[in-house]
């Protein structure tokens, strides 16, 4: 069983709802549940934790379903297809450490030394020239 909430049920729309229908449902529910616009006469100007949690669930559902990329990822996760989040490729430099030759290299076999990784270093771009600031 999935632990993620059903955003379509939260907004009372079907999974094939259009963006316009999702927005309309969100605004209707927001007017109904928001403490500033709620029409409850017997409210006594208090808001319970359950009301705030329901309002938060409505807002969270809208954030996911109103963005096409987030909605597509949510729909894939609901259907059981694993979601792969694209990342930014990172250039990695591999440094080979110089170590004493092993017994295998003495016999004529070439043995590659183990790889060693160092912390990444940030180097400023050389394309943007730095200009000194003048204090007037």
Image (cartoon, rainbow, N blue to C red):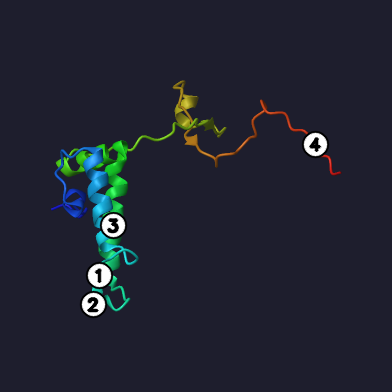
Residue 15 occupies quadrant: top left
Task: Name which of mark 2 and mark 1 comes first in the sequence.
Answer: 2
| Closest to the observer, 16 or 92 | 16
Cα gap from disc 1 to disc 3, whole angstroms: 15 Å
Residue in the picture at 83% in, 40% down: 134
User: Nearer the viewer's eye, disc 2 or disc 1?
Assistant: 2
Cα gap from disc 4 to disc 1, whole angstroms: 56 Å
Task: Name which of mark 4 and mark 2 comes first in the sequence.
Answer: 2
Residue under label 1, please give it: 50
Task: Name which of mark 2 and mark 3 comes first in the sequence.
Answer: 3
Whether the residues at callouts 4 and 3 have beta carbons within 8 Å, the answer is: no
Is residue 47 shown left or right of residue 76? right
User: Nearer the viewer's eye, disc 4 or disc 2?
Assistant: 2
| Closest to the observer, 62 or 131 | 62
Query: Considering the numbered disc 1 on the image, is that residue within a helix, a strand or a loop?
Result: helix
Q: Which class describes the residues within 10 Å of circle 3: few (<14), some (14-19), or many (20+)?
A: many
Question: Residue 30: which disc?
Answer: 3
Is residue 45 shown left or right of residue 131? left
User: Nearer the viewer's eye, disc 2 or disc 3?
Assistant: 2
Residue under label 2, please give it: 42
Query: Considering the numbered disc 4 on the image, is that residue within a helix, a strand or a loop?
Result: loop
Query: Considering the numbered disc 2 on the image, is that residue within a helix, a strand or a loop?
Result: helix
Residue in the picture at 48% in, 26% down: 105
Q: Which class describes the residues within 10 Å of circle 1: few (<14), some (14-19), or many (20+)?
A: few
Residue in the picture at 13% in, 53% down: 1
Cα gap from disc 2 to disc 3, whole angstroms: 19 Å
């Amino acid at each position: 069983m999935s632990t993620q909430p059903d955003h379509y049920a939260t907004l009372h729309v079907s999974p094939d709802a259009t963006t316009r229908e999702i927005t309309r449902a969100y605004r209707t529910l927001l007017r109904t549940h928001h403490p500033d616009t709620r029409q409850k006469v017997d409210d006594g100007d208090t808001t319970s934790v359950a009301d705030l949690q329901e309002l938060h669930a409505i807002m969270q559902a809208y954030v996911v379903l109103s963005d096409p990329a987030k909605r597509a990822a949510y729909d894939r996760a609901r259907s059981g297809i694993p979601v792969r989040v694209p990342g930014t490729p990172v250039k990695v430099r591999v440094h080979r450490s110089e170590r004493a030759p092993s017994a295998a290299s003495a016999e004529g076999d070439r043995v590659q030394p183990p790889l060693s990784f160092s912390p990444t270093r940030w180097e400023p771009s050389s394309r943007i020239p730095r200009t000194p600031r003048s204090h007037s």
